Image (spheres, grey):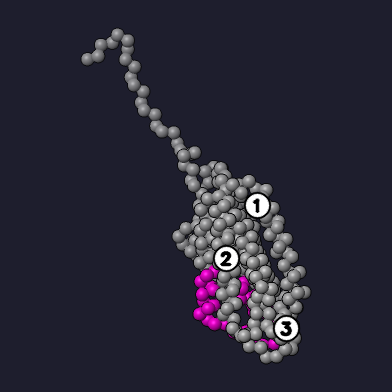
Amino acid sequence: MHDTVDGFRYGLVTPLVAYLMACLGGALGLRCTTRSLSAARHRRPAWLALGSAAIGSGIWTMHFIAMMGFTIENTPIRYDWTMTFASLAVAVVMVGVGIFMVGYQGARGTPLFTGGTITGLGIASMHYLGMAGMRLDGRLGYDTPTVAVSVVIAVAAATAALWAAGQIRGFLWSVGASLVMGLAVTGMHYTGMAALEVHAHGTADPATGGAPAELLGPMLIGPLAFLVLAGVVVLFDPLMVTGKPATRPGGEDRPGVPAGAAAHRPPAPRSPDRQTVREGARIP
């Protein structure tokens, strides 16, 4: 990395806040995914969509909070509005594809691997698309092996998180999974930043884009407000907190949810009644 690059302008403040935002988005998204597995079929898409938006907003917010601490000495940085918003859309859509796969096919085997891979690629795509929206008087390059490591971290973290969401082992289980997911997503971000190579040409302002303070601050308000609203939904749904599966109407099959066969088990066949022996009858 170029020696004039500083990713920790405010010390540990931005990495810690970014990590907390990744954990918050992960916790809300994973709880919504878990809740969808025990919801009625007509309500499942709403829970999965809410979970996708929560995770996508969380990792996007984490990325740009961390980028507030990124500076290049004597080189002004600006951000392109279109590319920045496009990175949020990519994160939500690709994470949504992975979550819907797990929500409808279960957190196991091929659906888990495919869904985790797509979700992880969505996280990595959000990061590098957001970096592509950065404007400066120079050019950016990347170390390919380090980029590959960052993508592997994202895919592994997403797969592990989706697997945890499908276990339905209660609220604390999902909290632990979200902490791990937040650590992995933040690690993926800074691994990707370690792959960055900046070649500054001069100190002139970029021709296009908005300054970080006037662009990133207002843009973060929307995703943060959404995460707060998603948190309210979690708090006011008892099943989201307790993690207890809901009673399934009509014995509807739901991937990842215990079948509850005991509750719907057909009665055991009755043994044939013994033939009544007549009183006083002689037994041969």
Q: CA distance from mark 2 to mark 1?
A: 22 Å
Residue at x 65% of width, y 64% of height: 21
In the image, 108 versus 202, the foreground residue is: 202
Q: Quadrant of residue 271?
A: top left
Left-right relation of 4 to 283 = right
As drawn, the label of residue 234 is 1
Q: State left or right for residue 215 relative to residue 114.
A: right
Rounded to the nearest whole Å, what is the CA distance between mark 3 and mark 1? Answer: 41 Å
Is 22 positioned to the left or the right of 212 in the image? left
Of residues 136 and 122, which is closer to you in this image?
136
Secondary structure of residue under mark 1: helix
Residue extending furthest front?
11
Amino acid found under the numbered disc labelled 3: Pro
Q: Quadrant of the N terminus?
A: bottom right
Contact between labelled residues 2 and 3, with CB atoms less than 8 Å apart: no
Work out whether 157 lies above or below 241: below
- Of pointers 3 and 1, the one earlier in the residue sequence: 3
> Which of label 2 and label 1 is nearer to you?
2
Question: Callout 2: few (<14), some (14-19), or many (20+) C-alpha neighbours within 10 Å?
Answer: some
Q: Residue at x 56, y 42 (%)?
A: 247
Label whose residue precedes the other's in the sequence (2 or 1): 2
Q: Which residue is mark 3?
A: 76
Badge 3 crowding class, 10 Å Cα cut-off, few under 14, some 14 to 19, many 20 or more, is some
Task: Indicate the position of residue 122 as horizontal and vertical percent values.
Answer: 58, 69
Q: Mark 3 and mark 2: span between their CA atoms?
A: 30 Å
Which quarter shows the C terminus?
top left
Residue 277 against residue 201 in the figure, above or below: above
Residue stretch rendered in magenta on the structure: 125-154
**Where residue 173 appears, x then y in whole percent?**
54, 53
Q: Write down the residue under mark 2.
A: 183
Q: Is residue 77 magenta?
A: no
